[in-house]
Image (tube, grey):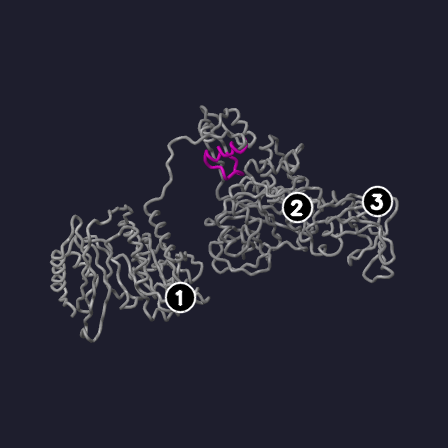
Amino acid sequence: MKVSYQWLSEYVDLTGYTASELAEKLTRSGIEVDIVEKRNKGVTNVVVGYVKSREKHPDADKLSVCVVDVGQSEDLQIVCGAKNVAAGQKVPVALIGAKLPGGLVIKRAKLRGVESMGMICSAKELGLNDRLLPKELQEGILVLPGDAEPGQSVIELLGIDDEVLELDLTPNRSDCLSMIGVAYEIAAILGREVKLPEDRIGPHASQTKTADYIRVEIAPSAPCSRYTARRIAGVKIGSSPLWLQNRLMAAGIRPINNVVDVTNYVMLEYGQPLHAFDADRIEGGRIEVRLARDGEMLVTLDDVERKLEAGMLVIADAVKPIALAGVMGGANSEVTAETTAIVLESAKFDGGTVRKASRLLGLRSEASLRFEKEVNPEAVIPALNRAASLIAELAGGEISDGVAEAVAHEAEPKQVRVALDKINGYLGTELSLSEVKGILDRLHFAYEETGGELDVRVPLRRGDITRDVDLIEEIARLHGYDNIPATPIQGATTPGGLTREQTIRRAIRRLLTESGLHEVVTYSFTHPSQIAQYPGLYPQAKPVALAMPMSEERSVLRTSLVPHLLDVIAYNRNRNLDDVAVFEIGKVFVTDEERLTTLPQEKLMLAIAWTGSRSPLHWDGKGEKVDFYDVKGVFEKLTSYLGIPAVRYVPAAPDGFHPGRTAEIRLGEGDGLRVAGRLGQLHPSLQQARDLDDTYVLEIELAPLIELANFRIEHRPLPKFPAIGRDLAIVVDEGVAVGDIRAKAEETAGSLLEAIDVFDIYKGERLGAGKKSVALALTYRHPERTMTDEEAAELHGKVVASLEQSFGAELRK
C-alpha cells in the first residue's frame, strides 16, 4: 500500500512530523514501512508556460522555435525538439538555472544558431513515472491542463512536492489497505483525531428515485452479504482534474477517466472497491448477484472471453452476466465515452469466493486484493455515497434519490472481554486501567468496564481482532514495544537432546558417508510406473494419488526409495560419472486401500544404491567393479556399529532383483525374527530398461534397527592363553547355505569357539554335479586355561560330526 503524505494529512493532523518520522513510528508499532519515496526527484525552478507560437527552426527540420509566456515581464524563446509541441498549449518550462533529475542544470544555449532561454519538459524529464500517464502523454512534452496559470510552480501543480510511504502489510492488517485505515492507525499512534471525508450528494440530488430504474437481488446461494447501487444520470465522460490524477499516480494507479478514477480514488480512500456500469446497457432494470452457471461466458474489460465455472460469483442483469464479482467488470456494461448514465456498485462479497475465481482465471487486481482480505462492511454505504457525490461533481449529472440495496445478513461488531491482570501478565507490564482505557480511546474502540474487566466493542474495520490476545497485542503496540520491560524466563528448563531415533539416524548418516557413500534427498512423490517397475518391500501396497499433483511425474506417494536412487544414478551416468554410491533415509507411504479412509502408514527406510567401481582407477592397481559383498560389507559395518549381532541373510528372488544374487535380511532371534529388508543386484531386465551397468541395492526398514540397536560398549581384556586353529573343508550340496553351516558349527562348539571364517568356496567337475566345497578356519580358545591339543581335537571332531549329520557333509579329500 502506497500512502501519500499530503493525502494522508487531509484525514489526520500531521503537524510536527515528517514522512520519515511517521514511517519510524509506524514501523515501531508493528506496520513495517519499506521505503519513504520522494516524488520530487530533484526538480527546481520549473513553471507553467503558455506556448504563444511555434515556428519551424530555420536550420533543423526536427526542431521548433517557440515563444512561451512563463508569467514574467518578457516572453521566452525556447527551442524544442518534441513533435507534439503546439501553440496554445500549457507546458512545463524549466527556466535558466533550473535543476532536473540526474543533476541536469538548464543553461542559456544556442541550438543551430537560435538562442534558447529554457527547456520545455516531458514527464520523464521531470522524474515522473510516465507509464502511469495516458498513452498520448507518454511521448513528447507533457501537456498541462488548460486552467493552469503561466508562472505557477509545476512542482505544486503536479503534486510532486510530496512523499510516499510504502507499507509492507501483513495479511491480518487489511484495514490499512485504505487511506482512512492508515489515518486511524496514525491518529492512534499520535493521539490525534481522524477527520472523515464528507459526501455532498445534496447539491446533486435529483427528484427521480434509484428504485424506479434499478432493483437489486442476492440469490439465496450467493456468498454476498450486502449489495448496494446508486444511479447517476447526465454524466459526461472526460479527463479527471489534475489533483485527482496526482493522487492516483502517487498510489501507483494510472488515471483513465473521471468516472473510473473516482471509483479507484474512493477504493484507496475507504478500502472499498466500487464498479460503475453503463446504466443503459443493463437489461431489464435488474441486477442479481448469483453464482455462475457452468459454461457461461463473459468478455471482461481486458477484452478476453472467459469461460466461467460453477462457484464463481457474478453480477448479472435480467439476461446475462455483466461482471465477475470483486474481480473485473464485463465489456458488455463498460463505461465508454458515449455513456450518459451509470449505475454505481458497492458491495461486500465473500473473500474466499473472490480469491478462488481470481486464481482460477489468473486475474489479480487492486479490487480483488481487498475483497480477498475481507472489506469493512460498515464502509459499503459511505463509500458509495462518497463516490456518487464526487462523480456528480467531476462528471456532472444528478444522483437519483435513495439506494438500491439487498442485504443477506448484517455484520455485527465483535465483543471481546479482556482483563487487566491478563494484559499485564502477558506483557510483563504494570499498566493501570486508565492507561488501557486511554489506548482503547486512541484506537476508537468503544468499551464498558465490568469489575476490573473491559468489554470492548471492536469496530468492523478491524476484522483481525477476535480474541482477547488480539486486544493485548493492540495495547502492546500502542504502549510501545520499547516500553515493555525485559523479563527473565521463569520456571523449569529442560535441556535439549536427541531422541533415540534421531541419534541412530545421525549415526547411520555419519558411518555411511565415512564409508564413501553420498547422501541424497529425493521427492516423496513419484510416477505410478516407477512403483509398478520396482514394487520394493511392499508389493501389495496401493499407490496414494495426490489430489493436486505438481505434475504427472509426481502424482503418487512413493512406496520405495530405490526408484529415485536409480534416477540419481542415471542422472550422473548421463554426465559421465559412472561410479556412483548413494544412500537415502526417508519415508515411504503404505496402504492397502484403493480409496483412502485412513491415513497411510509412514515407514522410515534406508536405501543404498551402488554401481561402477568400488575405487577409482590408480596406477598401482585396477579399479575393481562393485559387487554384492561391497554393499553387504557396508551394511555389516553398520549393524556392528549399532550393536546388532543377530543378522541373517537368506537367498531370495523378489521382483526387480537378480534371482541368484539377492538375499533377504532377517533381524532378531526366535519369535522376534523378522524380514527387515533386501540386498542384492537389480534384475538385468530392469538394469537394461534404465540403461544401467550392474547395480546393487539395499533397502531396509529402520524401525527394527532402531529397536535392536545397542550402543553399550563392552570391553574384553586381551587373552592370557593361546588359541588353537583348525581348518576344515567339507563337500555339501550346492543348495546348503554357508550361513547355516556357520551357525551349526557355533552351536556345537559353544563358547570355546572364538572365531569361524569362510576362506574358500569351490565348485567344479571333480566334486560332481550339484556339489560345492566350503573351507572354514576355526579358532578355539579356553578363557581360563591353556587348551590341550587333545581337547581341541575332540571338540573339532564334534563339529565335523554335527556338520555330517545335519547337512550330509563329507570331508574333502
Quadrant including the N terminus: top right
Q: Name the residue under label 1.
A: 620
Q: What residue type is labelled 3?
A: Gly
Q: Is 264 located above or below residue 595 in the figure? A: above
- Kind of residue sitting beneath label 1: Asp
Q: Distance between the residues labelled 1 and 3?
A: 95 Å
Q: Is residue 210 left or right of residue 769?
A: right
SS for dot 1: loop
* Magenta span of residues: 458-479
Asked if marks 1 and 2 touch (Cβ < 8 Å), the reply is: no
- Whether 453 is drawn above or below 374: the answer is above
Q: Earlier in the sequence, mark 1 or mark 2?
A: 2
Q: How far apart are marks 2 and 3 (CA)?
A: 28 Å
For label 2, the residue is 250
Q: Which callout, 1 or 3, points at the residue further toward the start of the chain?
A: 3
Q: Which numbered mark, 1 or 2, is in the foreground of this view? A: 1
Give percent across and percent down for residue 474. Answer: 51, 34
Residue that numbered label 3 is attached to: 71
Labels 1 and 3 touching (C-beta < 8 A): no
Q: Give amino acid for label 2.
A: Ala
Circle 2 Cα neighbour tier, 10 Å, few/some/many (<14 / 14–19 / ≥20): many
Q: Can residue 52 be seen in this view?
A: no
The relative height of residue 676 versus residue 450 in the rendered view (above or below) is below
Residue drawn where x is 27% and y is 50% of the image: 643
Does residue 412 sit above or below 704 in this rendering? above
Which sits earlier in the primary sequence, circle 2 or circle 3?
3
Q: What element carries label 2?
A: helix
The answer to whether residue 102 is magenta is: no
